[in-house]
């Protein structure tokens, strides 16, 4: 059923940065509502790679993405922010202090400020141009995300790509998959140097096979059952890899959807913000996380958390213009009651 809600801050995007923004708003006694097109919170962390380890979260030497989302949900629980999930934001009306958001489900959210934490926007995989790809996708032979490593136990897996996802999953599937082939068009990987070195060491030990310099060329099998992946060099030399699963990791396509028509200053599909406040070119509308752009920006969850704190403090001045904000550390203030 469509809902009508009144709140201080409408947070568009319930990924890790959006969830932490709800916490930072709560700490300033600001009410928030979380809106996300996905059916569950967590963004890419939950939808694409819940079992993928993350190593750069403070005080967490290693944490799986899904567990991080669970902990963030626990952290915001005292503030009880409503979750409007499976909803896509379609329209924005009004001005700072009195915005109205509308969703494709008919929800209406009245908010003093808007905080965009939409990550990559509505995201989807970049698919390789292979004949018959849809049939293999439908049969479960081609995956663009790995939700459970165990689903690939005993499988012969071809991983295509040269970025972090390709390298990380090649390393993560050792000892689980029967065979792992990593197909890349050149010897240099775009992944983190430490991960790339671990992959090279794994190849030397025979744990993975690096198929370089090759690119995906064709899929072979019948009725959606994959039997081999054909790869080719730029010179036309081909090779067949016996495999029953293909994992193409060629990144995500970004689509801001209706947000792109809100009159915000954009730069290469990202929203330009002021570094000190994360406010966009539209007063009262803020953006944080991967969707935000400014000089020196790093696309790290860690930086998104920092942006959430800065934006929350800047938003306080928008929705509580007559109330002075006295900065306090959480060790002093504790968790306020809303």
Image (cartoon, grey):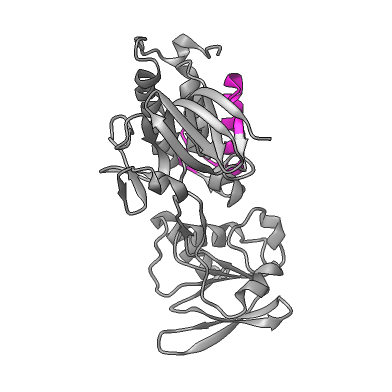
The quadrant holding residue 294 is top left
Q: Residue 138 at x, y = what percent?
A: 69, 68
* Above or below 248: residue 113: above
The C terminus - image quarter: top right
Question: Where's residue 116, x and y in %?
Answer: 43, 37
Q: In percent of the image, x 32 and y 35: which residue is there?
A: 282
Determine whether 226 is above or below 121 in the image: below
Q: Can you tell which quarter of the image residue 293 is in?
A: top left
Q: State which quarter of the image contains the N terminus.
A: top right
Residue at 33%, 54% (x, y): give it. 268
Q: Is residue 46 above or below residue 132?
A: above
Residue nearest the viewer, comparing 110 with 291? 110
Q: Report the residue at 59% width, 58% height from top.
A: 145
Q: Nearer the viewer, residue 90 or 62?
A: 90
Q: How many marks?
A: 0
**Residue at 44% from the left image edge and 40% from the top image edge:** 301
Which segment did they paint magenta?
A: 55-83
**Horizontal placement of 28 versus 5: left or right?**
left
**Residue 203 showing in the rendered view:** yes
Instruction: In the displayed orientation, state which residue is furthest to the bottom.
Output: 236
Whether residue 116 can be seen here: no
Whole-percent x, y for residue 213 in the image: 43, 78
**Residue 56 spot, x, y in % from top left:** 45, 41
Foreground pick, 84 / 103:
103
Assess whether residue 219 is covered by the magenta stretch. no
């Amino acid at each position: 059923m469509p809902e009508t809600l009144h709140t201080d801050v409408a947070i568009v995007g319930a990924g890790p940065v959006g969830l932490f923004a709800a916490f930072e708003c709560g700490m300033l006694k600001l009410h928030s509502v979380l809106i996300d097109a996905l059916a569950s919170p967590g963004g890419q962390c939950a939808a694409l790679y819940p079992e993928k380890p993350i190593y750069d979260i403070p005080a967490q030497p290693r944490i799986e993405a899904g567990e991080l989302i669970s902990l963030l949900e626990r952290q915001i629980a005292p503030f009880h922010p409503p979750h409007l999930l499976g909803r896509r934001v379609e329209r924005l009306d009004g001005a700072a202090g009195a915005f109205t958001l509308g969703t494709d489900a008919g929800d209406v959210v009245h908010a003093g400020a808007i905080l965009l934490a939409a990550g990559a926007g509505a995201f989807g995989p970049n698919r390789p141009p292979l004949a018959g790809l849809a049939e293999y996708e439908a049969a479960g032979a081609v995956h663009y995300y790995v939700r459970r490593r165990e689903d690939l136990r005993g499988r012969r897996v071809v991983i295509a790509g040269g970025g972090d996802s390709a390298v990380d999953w090649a390393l993560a599937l050792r000892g689980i998959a029967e065979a792992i082939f990593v197909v890349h068009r050149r010897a240099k990987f775009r992944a983190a140097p430490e991960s790339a070195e671990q992959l090279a060491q794994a190849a030397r030990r025979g744990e993975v096979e690096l198929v370089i310099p090759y690119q995906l060329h064709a899929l072979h099998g019948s009725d959606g059952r994959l039997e081999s992946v054909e790869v080719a060099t730029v010179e036309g030399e081909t090779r067949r890899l016996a495999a029953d699963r293909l994992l193409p990791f060629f990144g995500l396509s970004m689509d801001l959807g209706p947000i792109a028509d809100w009159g915000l200053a954009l730069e290469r599909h990202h929203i330009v913000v002021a570094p000190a406040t994360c406010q966009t070119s539209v007063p009262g509308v803020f953006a944080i996380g991967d969707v935000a752009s400014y000089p020196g920006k790093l696309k790290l969850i860690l930086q998104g958390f920092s942006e959430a704190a800065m934006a929350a403090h800047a938003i306080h001045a928008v929705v509580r213009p007559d109330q002075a904000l006295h900065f306090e550390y959480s060790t002093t203030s504790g968790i306020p009651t809303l």
